[in-house]
Image (cartoon, rainbow, N blue to C red):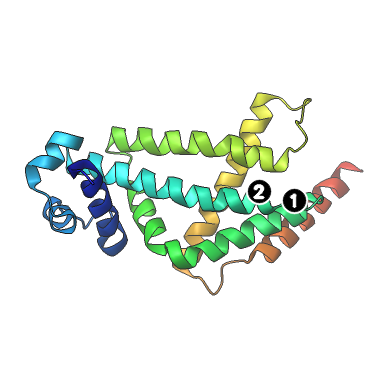
């Protein structure tokens, strides 16, 4: 493993142990058994390295969520959504430090354009996969604008669920509770359009 890969691995360890904001360049060097100059040489800055490590970690977590999405073969959409949300909730157990670092990074993105750009790119890649989970069988009559909105809606729910799980895991909804709430909302909307 070269310096670049060791730096990424060390930065990921630091993200999980110390978080995004509390990790120093010296922490990364110690965790990766490299040197300070290699951070600048390979990444340009500590922030760029931490961002690359965070995006890499989120992408690996995304592979896990993709598996959950692929396993969601139930014909009923609400059953598939419940399965997705349940898988997401279960993943918090092993990925909580990643989400803590992610929330820190979201707040810093306002002041670090490269971080914002990379996080936005990750979201751009996630939207189509989430939309495809809902819009199955090609969805030939569904516009790109609607697909993007569906993916964005599901991302918003996932992010909100994440924050609730981080702040108050006991009170945060389960996958089953989210699906029940969405069924109620859809029923209320359908009832209000019948008037």
Q: Callout 2: few (<14), some (14-19), or many (20+) C-alpha neighbours within 10 Å?
A: few
| Residue under the image location 12 percent in, 41 percent down | 38
Q: Position of residue 99 (x, y in %)?
A: 41, 57
Please identify the quarter of the rendering in which residue 129 is found: top right
Decide which of 24, 35 is in the foreground and name it.
35
Helix, strand or loop for disc 2: helix
Q: Callout 1: few (<14), some (14-19), or many (20+) C-alpha neighbours within 10 Å?
A: few
Residue 44 visible? The answer is no
Residue picked out by circle 1: 73
Is 95 above or below relative to 20?
Answer: below
Q: Position of residue 54 (x, y in %)?
A: 34, 47
| Residue under the image location 49 percent in, 63 percent down | 92
Helix, strand or loop for disc 1: loop
| Residue under the image location 78 percent in, 35 percent down | 137
Question: Would residue 75 be found to the left or right of residue 148 on screen?
Answer: right
Question: Would residue 116 be found to the left or right of residue 135 on screen?
Answer: left
Residue picked out by circle 2: 70
**Residue 36: numbered disc:** none
Q: Position of residue 86 (x, y in %)?
A: 63, 62
Please identify the quarter of the rendering in which residue 45 is found: top left
Q: Are marks 1 and 2 in contact (CB under 8 Å)?
A: yes
Q: Quadrant of the C terminus?
A: top right
Question: Would residue 80 be found to the left or right of residue 21 on screen?
Answer: right
């Amino acid at each position: 493993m070269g310096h670049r890969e060791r730096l990424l691995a060390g930065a990921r360890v630091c993200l999980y142990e110390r978080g995004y904001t509390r990790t120093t360049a010296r922490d990364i060097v110690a965790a990766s058994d490299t040197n300070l100059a290699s951070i600048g040489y390979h990444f340009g800055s500590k922030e760029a390295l931490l961002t690359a490590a965070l995006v890499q970690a989120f992408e690996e977590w995304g592979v896990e969520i993709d598996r959950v999405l692929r396993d969601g073969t139930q014909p009923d959409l609400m059953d598939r959504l419940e399965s997705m949300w349940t898988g997401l909730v279960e993943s918090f157990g092993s990925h909580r430090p990643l989400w803590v670092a992610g929330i820190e990074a979201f707040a810093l993105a306002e002041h670090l354009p490269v971080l914002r750009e990379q996080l936005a790119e990750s979201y751009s890649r996630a939207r189509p996969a989430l939309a495809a989970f809902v819009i199955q069988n090609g969805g030939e009559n569904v516009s790109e604008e609607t697909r993007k909105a569906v993916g964005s809606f599901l991302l918003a729910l996932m992010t909100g669920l994440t924050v609730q799980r981080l702040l108050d895991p006991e009170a945060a909804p389960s996958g089953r509770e989210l699906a029940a709430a969405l069924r109620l909302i859809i029923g209320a909307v359908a009832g209000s359009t019948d008037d």
